Image (cartoon, helix red, strand yellow):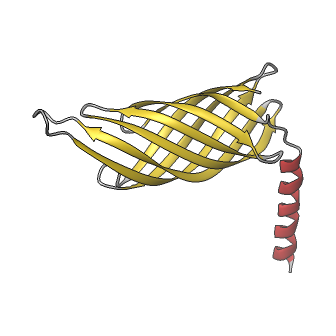
Amino acid sequence: MRTTLFCLLCLIGIGFSASAQRISKNALGLRIGDDDGFGAEISYQRALFESNRLEFNLGIRSGNNYDGFKLTALHQWLFPLDGNFNWYVGAGGGAGVYSIDNDLPGNDDTDSFAFIAGNAGIEYNFNIPLILSIDVRPEIGFGDFNDDFDFDLGLGIRYQF
């Protein structure tokens, strides 16, 4: 009985703290990350309610012998830390297309992959319409190119409107 009551009080407390959070309706910017090569992503965030949002990233990934595009969609929950600092967690997935550059002309290979992802990070919401964030995005891929675990660390800068 005590455990059930404690869990219920924790859920109510999380609900009140989450409802007090205010996020902007839209945010557009860049996320620069590092996983299987250097990558930059165009990032768009759309608020759903006061404490959660959707994030969409369209990225370009490149390495020593490949080039690719990657689309990621995440659902995130925000929690206030202190002042303008927030932390967030999320989950989602995505898909991508890549091209492997072989040494022999005409012997290039193109394929696609899918992945599921988690997301956790911290952000600072300036008094001007600007957000800076740093996050981690562990991904589990499915496909010939991306069929293992990747740990993506990213730095984001977004304009809020």
Q: Residue at 14% across / 36% down in the picture? A: 106
Residue 71 as seen in the image, left or right of residue 35: right
Q: Quadrant of residue 68?
A: top left
Q: Residue at 83% across / 75% down in the picture? A: 4
Q: Quadrant of residue 69?
A: top left
Give the image location of residue 14, x and y in percent: 83, 55
- In front of the other: 88 or 10: 88
Kindly give the residue lying farthest to the bottom in the view shown. Answer: 1
Residue 112 as seen in the image, left or right of residue 123: left
- In front of the other: 16 or 99: 99
- In front of the other: 54 or 133: 54
Give the image location of residue 137, x and y in percent: 53, 44
Kindly give the residue lying farthest to the front in the view shown. Answer: 106
Q: Residue at 83% across / 45% down in the picture? A: 50
Give the image location of residue 155, x and y in percent: 56, 29
The vertical placement of 156 against 7, above or below, is above
Q: Quadrant of the N terminus?
A: bottom right
Give the image location of residue 25, x and y in percent: 79, 36
Kindly give the residue lying farthest to the top in the view shown. Answer: 128
Q: Quadrant of the C terminus?
A: top right
The vertical placement of 53 against 102, above or below, is below
Residue 38 as seen in the image, left or right of residue 51: left
For the image, the number of numbered tags is 0
